[in-house]
Amino acid sequence: MKNVLYCGDNLEVLRKEISEESVDLIYIDPPFFSHKHYEVIWKDEAEIRSFEDRWEGGIENYIAWMRPRVVEMHKTLKPTGSFYLHCDWHANAHLRIMLDEIFGEKNFRNEIIWHYDIGTAPKKDLKRRHDTILRYSKTKDYIYNEQRIPPLNPVRYNIKEPDGRRYFTRGDSGKKCYLNEGVSPDDVWTFIREKSLRTLNSMAKERLGYPTQKPETLLDKIINISSNEGDVILDAFCGCGTTMAVAYKLRRKWIGIDISPTAIKLVEKRLKDIGAYRNEHYKTIGLPTSEKELRELKPFEFQNWVLDEIGGRVSRKKVGDMGLNGHLIKTLWHEKAGIQVKQSDRVGRNVVDNFETALRRDKYQKGYIVAFSFTKGAYEEVARVKNKGELEITLITIKELLDKRKTLLT
Ligand SMILES: C[S@@+](CC[C@H](N)C(=O)[O-])C[C@H]1O[C@@H](n2cnc3c(N)ncnc32)[C@H](O)[C@@H]1O
C-alpha cells in the first residue's frame, strides 16, 4: 500500500477509500468546540493566511458531527488496532461518552493527561494547563509496546549492588527494581515549555505556523507505544501533518486526511522536506484541479490555492486594504508585486482602477489580478495603465493558471 494524503471531508474519504480493518493506529486531533477563528501565522510574522475552526450550535451538534466519523474510523481499525482522540475541557466529557458507546466501555484503555505550562491565567479559576487524550483499543488483543522512562522518584532506589547499580525491593513480591532499568510510563505526560502542546516555541525547528500544530514528541510516544514498524497509521484530521512526519520517521506507513487544501499542501511540503514524499512512495488525492472545484472552495482556501500556484505570500500589513483586496504578495517569482485575488467572474474596470491606486500608493511597479474572467473594460483599463508608464498590471484567469500552472509567470 502507498502512503496517501486525501484532501476532503474525512467522512466521505473514510467511507469510500479506506478499507475495513486495514489500519493499525488512529490518532485524531479534531477541531475543538471552541468557536475560534484561527489565522494561520506563517514563519514570517508578517504573513497570514486564514483558517477557520468554527462550530455553530451546541455541543450536541458537535457530537452528532463527530459520531459518524468515529464510527467509520472504528471500522477501519484492525482487531489489534488502537485509537487516540486528542481533546480538551471543552468537549472531553461528551467525547468520552460517545467513544464508550462506539468502542465499548471495556475497550477504554487510558485517559492521558498532557500537562504543559503555557496558557492564560484567569483571576478566579485554576489555570487550565492540560489536554486530554482518550485511548481506546478495538478489542482486548491490542498492540502495546511497553516503553521505559526514568522514575519520578530516584531517591527511592537506595540499595547498592556491589557493581554500583541502585535498586529497591518491592514490598509484596521482594522483586528488585533497578534504577537503570527505568519504569513504564504513566498516564500523565509533561513536556517542558519548548515542547508544549499549546504553543510550540516559535524557535522550535518543527514549527510550521499551523495554529493547532502538535509537537512531534507527542506522536513519537503514541506511535511507539501502539504500533510496530511497517504498520499503517491514520490521522483523519491531519492538519499540518505531524502524525505523517513522525510515522515516516518511525518507518510506519501513513494515511492523512484533511478538508483544507491549504493544510494538505503544507503536509506535502513538510513530507517532501524530510524525504517522505517521493513519487513512488506516495500520492495525494482530492486537491482541487478544475474550475468547478475552485469555485466551490471557501474564499480563504481559494486565495491560498492561488497564492500557492503563483508562489506568493500574503502580507499581514495589507490585510483589510480594500484596493488590494486585503492581500498583497511580497514576492512573486523573486519580484515584488501586488496581487488581488477575486473568486468571481467578469471582474471589471473599477477593480483595476482601485488596484492601480493601491499599487501606486504602496510603490509597486507590478501587479496581478487573478479571477475566473474579466470584462473587456478591465483589459482596456490595463492597457491605459500601461500607456501611462511605470506600472504594469496583468490579468490572469483561473483557466490560464490551471492550463499553465507555475510556468505562467516565468
Ligand atoms: C486541530 S487541527 C489538527 C492539527 C494537527 N494535529 C497538527 O499537528 O497539525 C484540525 C484539522 O481538522 C481539519 N478538519 C476539519 N473538519 C474536517 C473534516 N470534516 N474532514 C477532514 N479534516 C477536517 C481542519 O482543516 C484542521 O486542519
Image: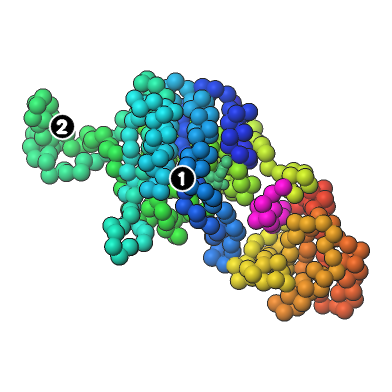
Residue 177 in picture, x, y percent from top left: 15, 32
CB of mark 1 near ligand 1 (< 8 Å): no
**Secondary structure state at the residue bearing disc 1:** helix
Q: Which is in the foreground here, disc 2 or disc 1?
A: 1
Mark 1: amino acid: Ile
CB of mark 2 near ligand 1 (< 8 Å): no
Q: Is residue 322 left or right of residue 131?
A: right
Q: Is residue 220 left or right of residue 1?
A: left
Work out whether 146 lies above or below 270. Answer: above
| Residue underneath mark 1 | 59
The residue lying at 53 percent from left, 34 percent from top is 69
Work out whether 316 lies above or below 192. Answer: below
The residue lying at 77 percent from left, 68 percent from top is 367
Displayed quadrant of residue 321: bottom right
| Residue underneath mark 2 | 177
Q: Is residue 49 left or right of residue 204?
A: right
Which region is colored magenta?
Answer: 296-309
**Secondary structure state at the residue bearing disc 2:** strand
Q: Residues within 10 Å of mark 1 (few under 14, many from 20)?
A: some
Whether residue 244 is visible, yes or no, is no
Mark 2: amino acid: Cys
Give the main secondary structure, helix, strand or loop, of the magenta stretch. Answer: helix
Quarter containing the C terminus: bottom right
Residue 380 in picture, x, y percent from top left: 91, 69
Work out whether 201 lies above or below 18. Answer: below
Residue 105 in picture, x, y percent from top left: 35, 27
Q: Are marks 2 and 1 in contact (CB under 8 Å)?
A: no
Taking depth in this image into account, of 14 and 313 the one nearest to the observer is 14
